[in-house]
Image (tube, rainbow, N blue to C red):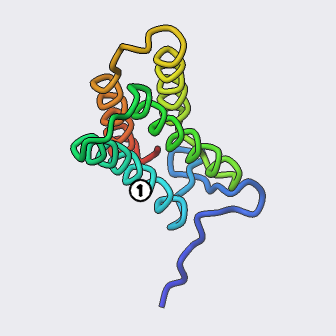
Amino acid sequence: MTRRRSSYSRSRGSSRSRSGGYSRSKSYAEERVERLTWVFLVLAIAGVQILQQGGMVLPNWTIPFAGCVVLLGSGMYQYSKRWRVAPTTWLAGALLAGMTLINLYISPGSSFLGISLIVFAGVILMGLLTGET
């Protein structure tokens, strides 16, 4: 029986790849957190839409704020575990935070639903293509 080689080296948590650079495979927990981030993004949109269908009137900043909390919260959690966090997560979270602030203070009547959906889809798509969120 062959012994499975660990993907982590003693010093930095990475192993040498064939090309000479460093690469690190993700742990199950790391992958799980990234998938949960995607699920929470979808649930944020679905939850807001269900509440609005039920007759509840929510402010325009609700969806960008929910996405901001999900992405930046996920990024901070992953960073606290010393896992790699994709720049897409930080950039999309900051963009959604900016949209929330614009909605709150500059233009309360603007709806950023479409842009928020594009940002959410972009984060999930980039995660699928690159393997990181």
Residue sitting at x 51%, y 40%: 71
Name the residue type under label 1: Arg
Q: Is residue 41 above or below residue 95?
A: below
* Horizontal and vertical percent position of residue 103: 46, 17
Residue at 38% over, 46% down? 44
**What residue is pinned by disc 1?**
35
- Residue 23: x and y in percent read 56, 50
**Residue at (54% x, 59% y) in the render:** 30
- Between residue 100 and residue 92, name the one nearer to us: 100
Q: Is residue 26 above or below residue 67?
A: below
Q: Does any portion of residue 21 appear in the rendered image?
A: no
Q: Is residue 70 left or right of residue 126?
A: right
**Residue drawn at (43%, 33%) of the image:** 62
Q: Would you call the spot at circle 1 few (<14 residues within 10 Å), some (14-19), or many (20 or more)?
A: some
Question: Residue 73, position in %: x, y?
Answer: 58, 45
Vertical arrangement, residue 22 with respect to residue 107, above or below: below
Q: Residue furthest top?
A: 106
